Image (cartoon, rainbow, N blue to C red):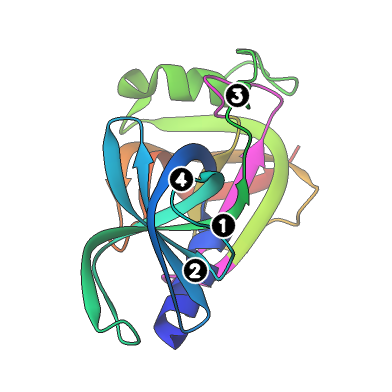
Amino acid sequence: MKKLALSLLVCASLYASTTHTAKVLETMNSGGYTYIKVQDGKDSYWVAMTQRDVKPGDTINYSEQGWMQKFHSKTLNRTFDKILFAADATAAPQQQMQTMKPNVMNSKYEQDGSVSIAKLFKYRDKYADSKVKVIGKVTKVSKQIMGKNWVHIQDGSSFMGKDDLVFTTKEKAPKVGSVVVAIGVAKKDVDFGYGYFYPLIIQEATFSSK
């Protein structure tokens, strides 16, 4: 279970969570964790979370942290082809609907030569593999994971609910709460393995004070 606990901790530190609402099909508890098979729209899959009281037929909300392929649970003596690590699952009323933030395309920090996070997500095909400059506030820093510092930045813009952009760097990470000028190479659909998949991420980043 140490492997699962570490995976949940690392995933939580890296991901800007996506929330799902799904129906519980099957559930089992083992080693302090709950494994839940869910029906999410047309898809069914397994979710792993810290132990909680759910039963078949419940509708739950959970926050996506990351996928793992061929995950083996020693306490269950079972290998899952793929499983989603998740958090914050709670029983949800059937009528509860997720509200999406309205699109805000412009950054409140934007200057000549910089681009908003919303525009980077919307036009990620255009910006892929190019150097970009973003000005925004540091909201989270995860240090020395996979040999890099992972810096989350927001700038007040949002596209389809995406308002948090991750920058990776081997340099010293800026402080949480600081407003910085971040420059790096935009990459789309980056898969680091072990469920670490990003539709957009900025690599080789450098930071300076605004």
Name the residue located 37 percent from the left edge and 47 percent from the top edge. Answer: 38
**Alpha carbons under labels 1 and 2: distance apart:** 9 Å
Q: Is residue 151 magenta?
A: yes
Q: How many numbered markers are drawn?
A: 4
* N-term mark: 2 or 4: 2
Mark 3 or 4: in front is 4
Q: Earlier in the sequence, mark 3 or mark 4?
A: 4
Q: Position of residue 195 (x, y in %)?
A: 33, 57
| Residue assigned mark 3 | 97
Residues at discs 1 and 2 in contact (Cβ within 8 Å): yes
Question: What residue sits right under mark 4 in the picture?
Answer: 57
Quarter of the C terminus within the rendering: top right
Residue 16 appears in the figure = no
C-alpha separation, residue under disc 2 versus residue under disc 4 = 25 Å
Question: As rendered, which of 69 and 25 lies closer to the eye?
Answer: 25
Query: Marks 1/3: CA distance?
Result: 18 Å
Q: Residue at x 31, y 63 (%)?
A: 194
Image quarter where the N terminus lies is bottom left
Provide the secondary structure element on which disc 4 rests. Answer: loop
Q: Say which residue label 1 marks.
A: 87
Residue toward you, 57 or 121: 57
Mark in front: 1 vs 2:
1
- Residue 123 sits inside the magenta stretch: no
Badge 1 crowding class, 10 Å Cα cut-off, few under 14, some 14 to 19, many 20 or more, is: some
Q: Position of residue 149 (x, y in %)?
A: 54, 63
Identify the amino acid type marked 3: Met
